[in-house]
Amino acid sequence: MARRYLTTVIQPSVLQLRRLIIAEADRFPELATTYYQRVPGHALTLLGSCFEDLAARGLLQTNEPELAATQFAWLVLAQPLNHAMFCGYSGPFSGSELDRIADAAVRVFLAAYPASNPGR
């Protein structure tokens, strides 16, 4: 999931739209708010629901699934997204490098939010 999320968000068309909306957010705040609610906000809501379900099953330890979702998203996205937003898509990240970043983010996340019932 982390790998797919990362590769989806840093697609050139997604980055172009994201840059445009950010650049015009002051002029068109309703557009920016709507985009945020429907795209990154929606993704965070879905992740939070998933993490809430995993916590209920003892597979993830969190009392704040929405916060966990935000932390997961930024662990996965921060480095390559910031680089792509500022330096363009043709950055230093190959597919294998993106996989490495996503996998490392998942390891950090699971260390912070381990299973509350590891035997399950």
Image: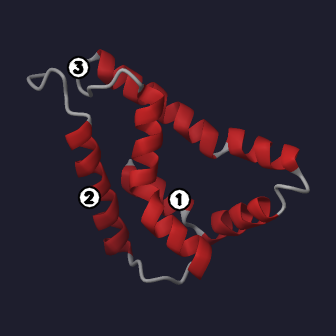
What residue is disc 3 on?
Answer: 58
What quarter of the picture does the C terminus occupy? top left
In the image: residue 20, left or right of residue 41: right
Q: Position of residue 45 (x, y in %)?
A: 55, 32
Question: Which callout, 2 or 1, points at the residue further toward the start of the chain?
Answer: 1
Identify which residue is drawn at 27% across, 28% down: 60
Q: What amino acid type is highlighted by mark number 3?
A: Gly
User: Residue 113 has which mark?
Assistant: none
Q: In this view, does 68 lie above or below 57?
A: below
Cβ–Cβ under 8 Å for marks 2 and 3: no
Q: Residue furthest top?
A: 56
In the image: residue 40, left or right of residue 51: right
What residue is disc 2 on?
Answer: 104
- Kind of element beneath mark 2: helix
Q: Where is residue 115 in the image (x, y as percent from the top left)?
A: 19, 28
User: Residue 8 has which mark?
Assistant: 1
Identify which residue is drawn at 52% across, 65% down: 81
Q: Is residue 69 above or below residue 74?
A: above
Q: Position of residue 117 (x, y in %)?
A: 14, 20
The span from disc 2 to disc 1 (Cα, nearest Å) is 18 Å
Q: What amino acid type is highlighted by mark number 2?
A: Ala
Q: Is residue 110 above or below residue 54?
A: below
Identify which residue is drawn at 20% across, 42% down: 111
The span from disc 1 to disc 3 (Cα, nearest Å) is 29 Å
Identify which residue is drawn at 49% across, 82% down: 91
Q: What amino acid type is highlighted by mark number 1?
A: Thr
Q: Which of marks 2 and 1 is in front?
A: 2
The span from disc 2 to disc 3 (Cα, nearest Å) is 22 Å
Question: Which callout, 2 or 3, points at the residue further toward the start of the chain?
Answer: 3
Question: Which callout, 1 or 3, points at the residue further toward the start of the chain?
Answer: 1
For label 2, the crowd category at 10 Å Cα-Cα, with few meaning under 14, some 14 to 19 and many 20 or more, is some
